[in-house]
Image (cartoon, rainbow, N blue to C red):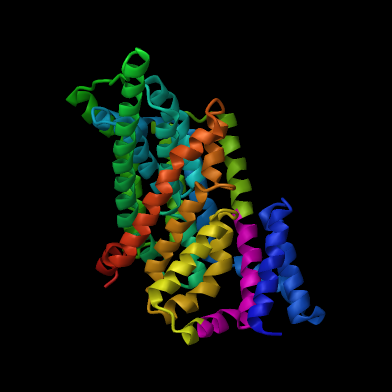
Amino acid sequence: MDSLVQGLIIASFAVLLFMSGMPIAFALAITALLSVLVFLGPGQFDLFGKMVFDSINDFGLLAIPLFVLMGNLFGGSQASRQLFEAGEAWLSRIRGGLAMSSVAASTMFAALTGSSPATAAAVGRVAIPEMEKRGYSARVSTGAIAAGGTLGILIPPSVTLILYGIAAEQSIGQLFAAGIVPGIVLALMFCIWVFIAQTLDMRRAESEGVKTGGQAFARAVKRYTWNERFTSLLKVIPFGLLVAAILVVLYRGIATPSEAAAIGALLVGIMVLGIYRGLTGRGLMDVLLDTTNQSTMILLITAFSAVIATVMSYLRIPQDLAALVSEMELNRWVVLLIINVVLLVMGMFLPPVSIIVMVTPILLPLIISQGFDPIWFGIVMTINMEIGLITPPVGLNLFVLKGIAPHIPLKEILIGSAPYIVVMGLAIALFSIFPEIVLFVPELLYQ
């Protein structure tokens, strides 16, 4: 049987299990087990357990539960409120400034959580009620939070980039360095759209007010003194110093990602209890339980996806796919476009973790054969995963927002989030045309 046909059979069976509604980890486990039995033979059944063990017997994976713990500790404290208030103090006078401060808070919060749903939930709980008080529409407020939350998997430290680095055998430090500038650029692009969206919203509301004889749209603006603005920054300084310290020890090679995550988790615990506060004994227990649940889910998905990838590699599916594309003599940009479309479709149904671990070993030979940089591709792939977080039918951030703001119709959240899909698509195009935007920092730090 042709290797590509075998790969199609494995993929089709996995999709059927995903559509059944069973947990992703279990669907991948069944697919992995049957792939070993069918394509390697019943005599190789004992390899299944060995491959599962080998796939997670990696010191680098220890960084995942530790970074998840860091994010959950911050999410359970008052850090998100203080970050939002600092952003509001500096941006509230700008049109759409409150929504921009949500994006800014999400950007900073993402730098320590590494989780998009956690970022959207933590910032959204604080920001959405405040924006509603100031007259922001549900579309503008929820769209900014949903999109800002996606930055959690791009801005380092990122669980997604750690998994990509392990799957692609690339430097996690370089991937973290590569995510800094694109994360900032994407946050600025989000803010530009917030300004446009708020302007359109105000004009629409004013027009409706004139037609109906009602009051024109008005938005209350909370005014801050310069003293209050600089005081708000003091609350962010410990947070900023911790992020900077983690990144410095990583980029200088002082510590591995796992060691940096361990130190970071310890310092975050001290900061949350001593500075940001908000965690009671019960709250701390909830944080630890959530961390255990999330980490177990990620590692199970990682283990079983890795088994599937190993079987596909044994069947030479990645190599044959790369050879087929080379024989077709397609333009490298056409190949990249096709890959992005496939990733976008997958992101609509699967979480980023499973896609990264399962697909990276297949796509990497193809990407390298087309002359693309694997570090650069890791960032492009991650942005594509961001799009999936706000794309129906399984856009996780959309349902997180619906959960914390049940009074807002899901339709309004979808409409508010949709333009950011285009913004992220433009960002992918920008980084494809100018890859030095992505590669500048890693080349500077790792020459």
Q: Position of residue 381 (x, y in %)?
A: 45, 62
Q: How many marks?
A: 0
Visible in this render: residue 178?
yes
Q: Is residue 134 above or below residue 94?
A: above
- Image coordinates for residue 196, horizontal then vertical, percent: 30, 38
Q: Which residues are magenta?
A: 298-324
Where residue 173 sits in the image (x, y, percent)? 38, 64
Residue at x 47%, y 73% (from the top left corner): 169
Above-or-below relation of 124 to 206: below
**What's the residue at 41%, 30% (across, down)?**
127
Q: Is residue 310 magenta?
A: yes
Left-right relation of 426 to 282? left
Q: Is residue 96 visible?
A: no
Image quadrant occupied by the N terminus: bottom right
Q: Quadrant of the C terminus?
A: bottom left
Picture quarter containing residue 316? bottom right
Question: What residue do we see at 35% from left, 30% from top?
Answer: 201
| Residue most extreme to the left | 226
In the rendered image, the vertical position of residue 401 relative to residue 435, given as above or below: above
Q: Nearer the viewer, residue 209 or 359?
A: 209
Outermost residue, front side: 211
Q: Name the residue nearer the viewer: 24 or 108.
A: 24
- Indicate the quadrant where residue 95 lies: top left
Task: Report the front residue among 179 and 52.
Answer: 179
What predominant SS class does the magenta segment belong to? helix
> What residue is drawn where x is 52% and y is 69%?
360
Residue 217: x and y in percent read 32, 20
Is residue 99 within the magenta segment? no
Compared across the picture, whether 141 is left or right of 234 comes to right
